[in-house]
Amino acid sequence: MTDEMQISPASPSLLRRIFVGPDNIRAGWSIAIFFLLMALFTTVFFFPTKVLLEHFKFRLDDSQPLPACAAETMAFLGVLGASMVMARIEHKPLVSYGLEGTGRLKNFLVGFVSGFAALSVLVGALKLSGFLSFDGQNIFGWQAIMYAVAWQAVFFLVGIYEEYMMRGYIQSTLSRGIGFWWSAFILSAAFGCLHLSNKGESSVGIFSAAFVGFIFCISLWYLKNLWWAIGFHDAWDWAQSYFWGTADSGKVSAGHLFSVHPQGSDLWSGGSTGPEGSLMILFLLPLIALLMWVAWRKRTNNGTEMQTAPSA
């Protein structure tokens, strides 16, 4: 009885120290709760989406715009739902996880132009080097316009879903525990590993996906929001899958504007992976990072001190 009286008062304090830190719930527990909530919300949205698509004779895949759009909407709603709950728990606005700030439309548009230009430079280099052959235009007129709009809707959802998932709540919360740049390295590696399940993916493609993820972290560091990264991600995928008609991480989309095919060594052409699997991308990505540093290095870093210092 005496022992219980001595231990009992200390127990709440011990539990509080395990689960709660200076910044509310500790980062590790917050992320674990976030993943559980994301899985719950995604499951809730999965079954009605699957039933609806099957009613219209579609499969839940990403080779056609409509099912791809449904799948990405479902995934984004799962992340959004989890973020909304965590924002409520942490007494923060939902946009505080990477969607805040001024100049959001401008950042998105600059990112979009940058993403399209970067991918087009890579495709042009592959063409000039003889590792990519053009087969001509594939679709025309209203069909080309409709597919362009449909795939743009899909890849906007891809951009906002993947960026908000990897560099939204998780990046923000993990930075509280281990600092911004350690979080950036870990989550960029995780982003690359997510591509392991893609058929036709290669080791170069996985590494380049991780590198692109780190570039998006650089943009978050300088711009304090994800809108440039969302625009870049959107345009990069749209340019590959729709405009130039290349494979994107091993996947070829229906209704692409131009048709191309790789030729020569897979290491240089990218093979079935697409341009992301070419060794040429390893020259392009550091150049993009350098240009970002040149363009943004004079920006003030107000507020980043809290992100870089690990919490006790």
Image (spheres, helix red, strand yellow):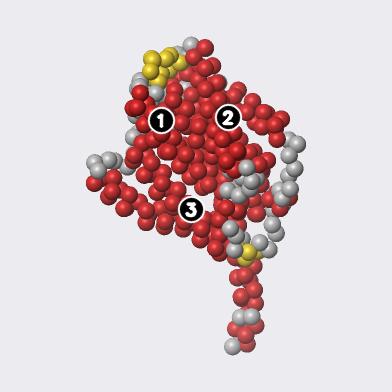
Instruction: Looking at the picture, tell me which residue is in the foreground, 94 or 172.
Output: 94
Q: Which mark sits nearer the N-terminus, 3 or 1?
A: 3
Instruction: Looking at the picture, tell me which residue is in the foreground, 164 or 150.
Output: 150
Residue 125 position within the rendered picture, expressed as x and y whole percent measured from the top left? 54, 16
| Local SS, label 2 | helix
**Hey, what amino acid is under mark 1?**
Ala
Q: Using the image, tell me which numbered label, if any, was put on residue 80.
A: 3
Q: Looking at the image, which residue is at 34% across and 27% down?
A: 142
Dots 3 and 2: beta carbons under 8 Å?
Answer: no
Residue 307 position within the rendered picture, expressed as x and y whole percent measured from the top left? 68, 50
Q: Looking at the image, which residue is at 42% across and 15% down?
A: 134
Q: Looking at the image, which residue is at 61% across and 81% down?
A: 8
For the N terminus, the image quarter is bottom right
For the C terminus, the image quarter is bottom right
Q: Which of the two marks, 3 or 1, is nearer to us in this view?
A: 1
Residue to which mark 1 is pinned = 148
Give the alpha-carbon distance from disc 3 to disc 1, as whole Å. 26 Å
Residue 42 position within the rendered picture, expressed as x and y whole percent measured from the top left? 40, 53
Residue to which mark 2 is pinned = 114
**Hey, what amino acid is under mark 2?**
Ser
Dots 2 and 1: beta carbons under 8 Å?
Answer: no
Q: Residues within 10 Å of mark 1 (few under 14, many from 20)?
A: some
In the rendered view, tell whether residue 28 sits above or below residue 144.
Answer: below
